[in-house]
Image (tube, rainbow, N blue to C red):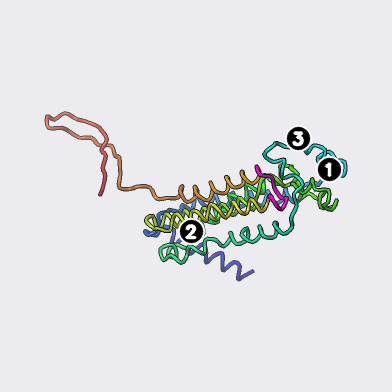
Amino acid sequence: MKTFKFLILFLFSLNISNAQNETSPYEWKWKRDGIWTATALAGNALGFYFIVNKDGLTESELQTVVAGRDNINAIDRWAAGKSSQTASDISDIPFYLSFAAPLALFFEDEVNDNGGQIFGLFLESMATTGALYTLTAGLVDKSRPYVYDENESLRRRLNASGQRSFFSGHTSVTATATFFVAKVYQDFNPNSPGIPYIWAGAIALPAVVGALRIEAGQHFLTDVMLGYAIGASIGYFVPELHKKKNKSLSLTPVNGFDYFGESYQGLSLKYRF
């Protein structure tokens, strides 16, 4: 426990010392970002509470769900009944690796010099995605595709975990991580020739994860699409919203007297090259 506390204090002290580093395109404000991150982490805790206390299906409810298979929208219906443990296990690999994705950025000297700030932004991004996912999964009941598979064990089909299809957490978390890495790399290296390749990887990886989650019978296509959109948006826009404003352009009120002694008031627009 002491080691854990020391690590937390070290990370936050690192964040304070590096948050306003001139080499960073971002700015961190403790009042704004502290409240944002704390609220998101609290949302995660509340969401997990809802998930843990979520109810499963009774056998009669399961029969009703299966009987309504034809009522599933056409975009999703083809996935009902899918189930693959292999696909599920493979999808776990990029999902868990995504939590360490920012480490790839620290090979860049300027990113490394702002390590605490980047850690803070990444924590804020992942906490936001996590809060949206856990709260939604905990409050919304939607049967996973494998619930429709009559070859699956009855116990698994009735379990509360089977009611968390909406939306895909694996896809959203992976998209948040990859888009965050690509966005931060681009902002630190706006002229890098590697940017298109990094973005190609950032776009492709969560799409692969989403496809695997469908094949695993964990989610329908719309669950994956929504998870992708949420994760990608957060991964991109959290860094974007923290970018430093252009301080070379300023607008200030002015007043005085003109050549004829008449008073005047106005606005002065200044641009520093």
Question: Which residue shows up at 60% across the image and 71% down it?
Answer: 3
Q: Pick whichever, 221 or 234, lies toward us.
A: 221
As drawn, the residue found furthest toward the left would be 260
Task: Write the residue at 74% across / 49% down.
Answer: 82
In the image, taking residue 179 as reference, residue 264 lies left or right, namely left
Instruction: Name which of mark 3 and mark 1 comes first in the sequence.
Output: 1
For the image, the number of numbered tags is 3
Q: In which quarter of the image is the N terminus?
A: bottom right
Separation of residues labelled 3 and 1 (CA atoms): 15 Å
Q: Quick one: label 2 or label 1, which is nearer the N terminus?
A: 1
- Where residue 247 appears, x then y in whole percent? 33, 48
Which amino acid type is shown beneath numbered disc 1?
Answer: Leu
Name the side, left or right, on which 269 lies relative to 56: left
For the residue labelled by badge 1, is the local secondary structure a helix, a strand or a loop? helix
**Residue in front for this viewpoint, 34 or 137:** 137
Q: Position of residue 164 (x, y in %)?
A: 72, 47
Q: Quadrant of residue 74?
A: top right
Amino acid at dot 3: Asn
Residue beneath the point at 77% across and 49% down: 146
Instruction: Measure the C-alpha gap from mark 2 to mark 1.
Output: 46 Å
- Magenta segment range? 214-222
Check disc 2: other Cα within 10 Å, few if <14, some if 14-19, many if 20+: many
Query: Is 260 drawn above or below residue 62 in the view shown?
Result: above
Q: Which of 72 and 64 is in front in this view?
A: 72
Q: Position of residue 20 (x, y in %)?
A: 41, 57
Q: Which amino acid does label 2 sit on?
A: Ile
Q: Name the residue under label 1.
A: 62
Q: State the residue position of label 2.
A: 118
Q: What element carries label 2?
A: helix
Q: Which of marks 3 and 2 is in front?
A: 3
The residue at which mark 3 appears reads as 71
